[in-house]
């Protein structure tokens, strides 16, 4: 049994930045540091940061007045920023810059007098954050059926944006439906689906003809990890999402000669190595790296954290 280890996999630049912001804030200001929502959607990452002194909350009223709070990589509605300002909280924003780009697009589209249609998954924090960038004029669609039933004030003055972690194929289908129904619809200047999501999905598409099974490492609430599993399954390859090596089931590998292994953008590499070790225990005899795309994207830390020394910060 051979393992085909995909590259790129695992942490993207936005996730690395978000985790580094929490770690650096703990170094500079000490525990506790409050984080609104899971900073990234991975149980092991969150548990590790919790052990270091991060306190994860869902609402700002759980944060003491004047404390330090970090917004997760998924972004937050404007109302949350306003509340943090009113309560005198010190804020560090770990929103992925590619999500921030979508927020800016929404503001620009609304200023242009267009209603904005967001393609995304209802209830996902990125969607809630993006929808909350403006007071009105936003619509959410998840399926082509949603597009058919959508009601807008002026079909000639609409625009669309997408959640950054969608399946590219699914998003393309919905965008096509939007363009068919609203021929004058405006879109973002550049594709909203982030580079890491695209690259990891492209890598899965490349490997599926070569493997009998695909194992995706990622937490169940990770949108991009779920999409990787779906991409493989839609191409006829059995695919399984596991949060850690302990969730791997031996029967999934029955008669498999080549097993693809990848990881969602919020899954740490040490778990990938543990997964490989478990697969070796189950009969894998070799690991072949398969590099599809080279990544070199990085995002800087907020200036205040980047120039701070341990135990103090410029205010």
Image (cartoon, rainbow, N blue to C red):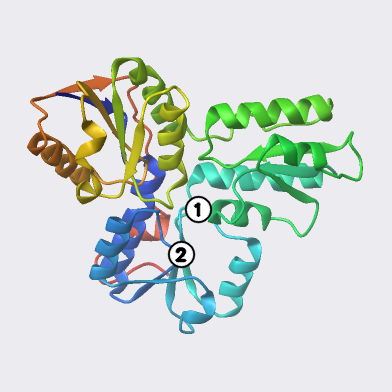
Do tag 2 and tag 1 residues touch (Cβ < 8 Å)?
yes
State the separation of the CA atoms marked 2 and 1. Answer: 9 Å
- Residue 37's label in the rendered image is 2
Q: Quadrant of residue 180?
A: top right
Residue 256: image quadrant is top left
| Residue 288 visible in this rendered orientation of the protein | yes
Q: Along the line of sight, which residue is nearer the eye, 43 or 220?
A: 220
Q: Would you say residue 299 is visible in this rendering? A: no
Percent x, y of residue 28: 29, 68
Q: Quadrant where the N terminus lies?
A: top left
Residue 155, above or below 46: above
Residue at 18% over, 41% down: 275
Q: Residue at x 22, y 32 (%)?
A: 253
Q: Earlier in the sequence, mark 2 or mark 1?
A: 2
Q: Residue at x 8, y 25 (%)?
A: 285
> Which residue is at the front of the view, 212 or 185?
212
Position above or below: 59 against 77? below
Assign a secondary structure to mark 1.
loop
Residue bearing the label numbered 1:
74
Question: SS for tag 2?
Answer: loop
Tell me if 252 is positioned left or right of 199 in this view.
left
Task: Describe residue 95's horizontal placement relative to residue 283 as left or right.
Answer: right
Q: Residues within 10 Å of mark 2 (few under 14, many from 20)?
A: many
Quadrant containing the C terminus in the rendered view: bottom left
Q: From the viewer's perspective, is 12 left or right of 182?
A: left
């Amino acid at each position: 049994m051979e393992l085909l280890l995909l590259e790129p996999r695992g942490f993207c630049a936005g996730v690395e930045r978000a985790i580094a912001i929490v770690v650096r804030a703990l170094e500079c200001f000490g525990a506790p540091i409050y984080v609104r929502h899971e900073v990234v959607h991975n149980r092991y990452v969150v548990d590790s940061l919790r052990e270091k002194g991060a306190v994860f909350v869902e609402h700002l009223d759980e944060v003491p007045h004047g404390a330090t709070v970090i917004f997760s990589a998924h972004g937050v509605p404007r109302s949350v920023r306003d509340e943090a300002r009113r309560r005198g909280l010190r804020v560090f924003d770990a929103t992925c810059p590619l999500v921030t780009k979508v927020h800016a697009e929404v503001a620009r589209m609304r200023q242009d007098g267009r209603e904005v249609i967001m393609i995304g998954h209802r209830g996902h924090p990125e969607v809630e954050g993006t929808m909350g960038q403006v007071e009105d004029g936003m619509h959410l669609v998840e399926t082509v059926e949603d597009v058919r039933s959508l009601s807008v004030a002026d079909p000639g003055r609409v625009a669309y944006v997408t959640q950054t972690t969608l399946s590219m194929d699914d998003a393309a289908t919905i965008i096509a439906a939007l363009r068919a129904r609203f021929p004058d619809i405006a879109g973002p200047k550049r594709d909203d689906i982030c580079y890491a999501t695209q690259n990891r999905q492209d890598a899965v598409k490349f490997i599926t003809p070569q493997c009998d099974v695909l194992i995706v490492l990622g937490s169940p609430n990770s949108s991009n990890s779920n999409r990787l599993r779906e991409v493989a399954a839609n191409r006829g390859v059995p695919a399984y999402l596991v949060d850690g090596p302990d969730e791997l089931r031996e029967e999934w590998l029955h008669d498999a000669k080549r097993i693809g292994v990848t990881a969602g953008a919020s899954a740490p590499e040490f778990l990938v190595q543990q997964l490989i070790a478990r697969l070796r225990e189950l009969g894998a005899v070799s690991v072949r790296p398969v590099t599809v795309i080279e990544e070199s994207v990085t995002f800087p830390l907020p200036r205040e954290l980047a120039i701070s020394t341990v135990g103090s910060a410029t205010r």
